[in-house]
Amino acid sequence: MSDPIQTVPHFINGEARMGEAARFAPVYNPATGQQTHRVPLGADAVDAAVAAARAAYPAWRATSLARRTHILFQIREHLAAHQEDIARIITAQHGKVLADAMGEVGRGLENVEFACGIPQLLKGEYSEQASTDVDVYSIRQPLGVVVGISPFNFPAMVPLWMVANAIACGNTFVLKPSEKDPSAALRLAELMTEAGLPPGVLNVVQGDREAVEALVGHPDVAAVSVVGSTPVARAIRRAAVAADKRVQALGGAKNHLVVLADADLAAAADGAVSAAYGSAGERCMAVSVVVAVEDVADKLVGAITERMAALAIGDGMDPRSDMGPLVTREHRDRVAGYVESAQRDGATVVVDGRAAPVASAPGFFLGATLLDHVTPLMACYRDEIFGPVLSVVRVSSLDEALQLVNDNPWGNGVALYTRDGGAARRFQFEVLCGMVGVNVPIPVPVGYHSFGGWKASLFGDTHMYGPEGINFYTRRKVVTSRWPSTTPAGVDLRFPGAR
């Protein structure tokens, strides 16, 4: 009888490869709690993947912009044609509802679409006759082999943030997905290869911390991109700098939604529930704190509670489900622990997800939870919970709300609900945060802008994707040229200057 537990392979030089791992980790269907796959751990495949990327680099770098663009257009169309296929893999291993997974893939495709404009994005600058018979121009060139380390909560979108721009610029890529839900990245690589991407340009290495450390320290790797928790991002940033790599590292978040007294409370409640409980709160842009200003709190809490009562929580494959399970049993239990600690610390548990009927069902479920009268000293406020727990903090003024947000160590995303244009203008001007929404609860930039926070939400040189992604995956070269003429220039030992 064959083993029903499938092993997730690596993808190296255009084909699936099993490797020689001695250790494996389980991969679960979070809705049932059953193991469906196992994923190899360790670093046994790292050298082979980097070698394949290095071997593919000279030809890919020399590939014309016209040809690269043609392949990117084919990739975009092929991924779009298999969008539901990718989404179902995400739902099966991460747990988010299928509609949410479809949206994730769609947002990832925005980055491929942006990269399809690479001939325009790589144009340099030219100065004719900068000096007599001398022209100066700049060009952008790729870095070489680059690495991406992606998180479990967006197993398709975040890899596309990285891969699309990197390969468009002429780099080759090694992707290390999360070991919790590794199959979506593998499917992306298969589909991109089917669409015409040459073997070795995109490789996928499964593994854990050992694989990450081997990739970051590998002498043939030029740059590293990572999205993860703040401790992970900080550690990888330090290791990459020590290894003399270029690095962009996005960390954690504690995103606030500030509601002023003049706001449309129905819209604010809709936004708070959507942003807090979508994907079971496992989003780096999820709202985890509502800041109720002046006397708006009681009405707002009531409106949020009403909307929570209508949420359907269940298997993400069921179209009736609004929210699915958390990714692992351990993570579910950790999130539930924050609800317990909040209650001990004096917060009011308005809606307790631990008591929801779904919490006792098979799988890694926790109901949507609402905490009121939370203070900045409580662990439920201080820590990034990364689950379906929304805290309400009450403040007396916009000044106090700004101070609360600006004092927080994270600065990823923030939203403000108001009808007052002056208040909104002041808020966006003064708030210390990388991404700001005004009456928009999840201000994720579109693919032709760039994504990234401030403070402890970002470690590295640049934000991710968009124009800053092009900057990250290229380096500028400036050429100063003079072509021989019939008149010899002669020897001149003076420091060169314009004449």
Image: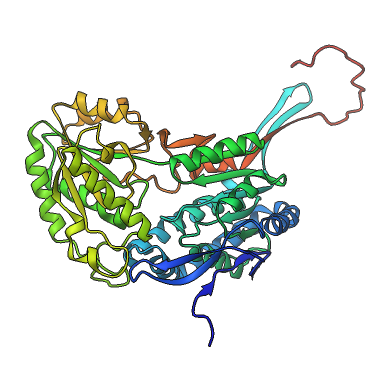
User: At 45% from the left edge and 42% from the top edge, which residue is drawn?
Assistant: 450
Where 313 falls versus 305 (above or below)?
below
**In which quadrant is the C terminus drawn?**
top right
Question: How is this picture coloured?
Answer: rainbow
- Give how far across and how far down residue 460 sits, in percent: 53, 35
Where 148 falls versus 38 (above or below)?
above
135 relative position to 184: left or right: right
208 relative position to 407: left or right: right
Of the pair 233 and 462, the residue shown nearer to us? 233
98 relative position to 124: left or right: left
Identify the residue at the far bottom of this view: 1
State whether residue 353 appears in this view. Answer: yes
Q: Quadrant of residue 222?
A: top right
- Give how far across and how far down residue 263 sits, in percent: 13, 38
* Numbered disc total: 0
- Give how far across and how far down residue 287 sits, in percent: 28, 45
User: At 51% from the left edge and 40% from the top edge, which residue is drawn?
Assistant: 249
User: At 36% from the left edge and 64% from the top edge, which residue is drawn?
Assistant: 95
Identify the residue at the far top of this view: 494
